[in-house]
Image: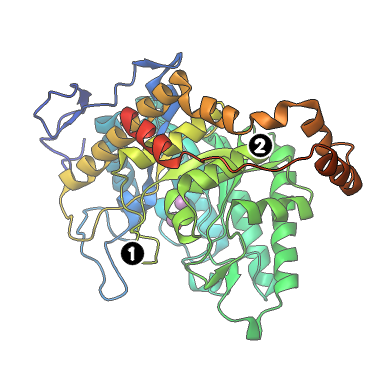
Amino acid sequence: MTDFFKGIPKIAYEGGDSRSDYAFRHYNPDEVVMGKRMEDHLRFSVAYWHSFAWPGGDPFGGQTFERPWFGETMELAKLKADVAFEMFEILGVPFFCFHDADVRPEGRDFAENTDRLKEMTDYFAGKMEQTGVKLLWGTANLFSHRRFMAGAATNPDPDVFAFSGATIKTCMDATKALGGQNYVLWGGREGYETLLNTDLKRERQQAGRMLQMVVDYKHKIGFEGAILVEPKPQEPAKHQYDYDVATVYGFLKEFGLEGEVKMNIEQGHAILAGHSFEHELAMAASLGILGSIDMNRNDYQSGWDTDQFPNSTLEAALAYYEVLKSGGFTTGGTNFDAKLRRQSLDPEDLILAHVGGMDVCAAGLKAAAAMLEDGGLEEARAERYAGWETDAAKAYLTSATLEDLETAVRSGPITPEPRSGRQERLENYVNRFV
Ligand code: XLS
Ligand code: NI
Ligand code: NI
């Protein structure tokens, strides 16, 4: 036991009347929602990087957090792991996620990085065995070290491409060894700052080739989890190739990977792309590539990826509505890709941020399930598109030509009558459940 969280109790469900800060009011892991335990629906995961590796810096100032595990030794990396698993147990989260660079100090070279990752993988295996906490996904940090400043797979230097692929391999090995349920690729610096020095066509081909190698290696080692790409439109690069779900889908098609790769969709990235979270989820579901979610919230004014903990039940409800409607998570889950504000220095801030986020997600999930069970939105949608149920309309989408449409319009005669889209009515409907 470390003494980092000393005095903080294990968080339990106490219901809406609880006066305690250290309690769930909505998240009740065993409560059954639409035939499944809440814990199995939500599949919460803590992000190692934000909670245990991030020092609290911003573009104008460095470290604000003082953590006893900060430093570059393996002993400190293990202390960090001890504290992390204590937090997983206090929260009762079933999963965590990590990048290689979050869990081990940077080595002198690739070989030392790999040895250190292996040592930490073994250490995690023991902790996972003791606590029952599982790995939702693993990933490689191919963006922090200066060698990646011009990208990883999309780098103009083939040495960086090789180093990146080799690193991905070691991270996939670690993920498989720990029984990870997914492997994620977020394109850290896979983009460009200026077209003036960039061969865009070549860089996209390099990225496509790397992803093909990842998929080949997954099959080769018999990794049973899903390969997930996480779209983001900008930051750190001015333009990122994996802009949003629709863009990534086009990319997957181009490289023949649409049946192999799904999406890890992050709330904040959706907002940066000018979409809503539910838009990205609905788009992925409609393409059959909805994998997992990075839950957070973006500041709607700032224009950068603020990675705040979610706190809007309405937004969570609209997001989980899409998840539930698509059949719910299989290998995916709800990863809190969210960090404290840099003034939130205390151990309890870390706990309470997650407690609030978990509760908002649980409340959102319950509201989403109630809406689906009530069926009001789906009925309204069915009614809106009911005209398409006639044989004549169905033929428009199969055999009809433009001449046939002209004949139909003239002989009907067809004179379209506009109808209300009933948006406010539906907004009011949603608010009844939130
Ligand atoms: C950064 C991304 C990152 C990925 C994992 O914006 O969200 O945290 O989730 O590399
Ligand atoms: Ni993310
Ligand atoms: Ni992000």
Foreground pick, 111 / 358: 358
Residue drawn at x 78%, y 55% is 254
Residue 360 in picture, x, y percent from top left = 30, 36
Residue drawn at x 34%, y 16% is 30
The C terminus, quarter of image:
top left
At label 1, counting other C-alpha atoms closer than 10 Å, the crowd grade (few under 14, some 14-19, many 20 or more) is few
Q: Which residue position is annotated with label 2?
A: 288
Q: Which mark is residue 264?
A: none
Up the image or down, 145 lies above or below 396; here it is below
Foreground pick, 131 / 301: 301
Up the image or down, 299 lies above or below 29; here it is below
**Quadrant of the rendered image containing residue 294:** top left
The N terminus, quarter of image:
top left
Examine the rendering and report whether any part of residue 218 can be seen. yes
> For the residue marked with disc 2, what is the amino acid?
Gly
> For the residue marked with disc 1, what is the amino acid?
Gln
Disc on the earlier residue, 2 or 1: 2
**Element under disc 1:** loop
Examine the rendering and report whether any part of residue 328 can be seen. no
Residue 347 in picture, x, y percent from top left = 17, 46
Residue 176 in picture, x, y percent from top left = 58, 37
At label 2, counting other C-alpha atoms closer than 10 Å, the crowd grade (few under 14, some 14-19, many 20 or more) is some
Q: Which mark is residue 301?
A: 1
Relative placement, left or right, of 11 versus 154 is: left
Up the image or down, 386 lies above or below 87; here it is above
Are the residues at dot 2 and dot 1 in contact (C-beta closer than 8 Å)?
A: no
Q: How many labels does the image show?
A: 2
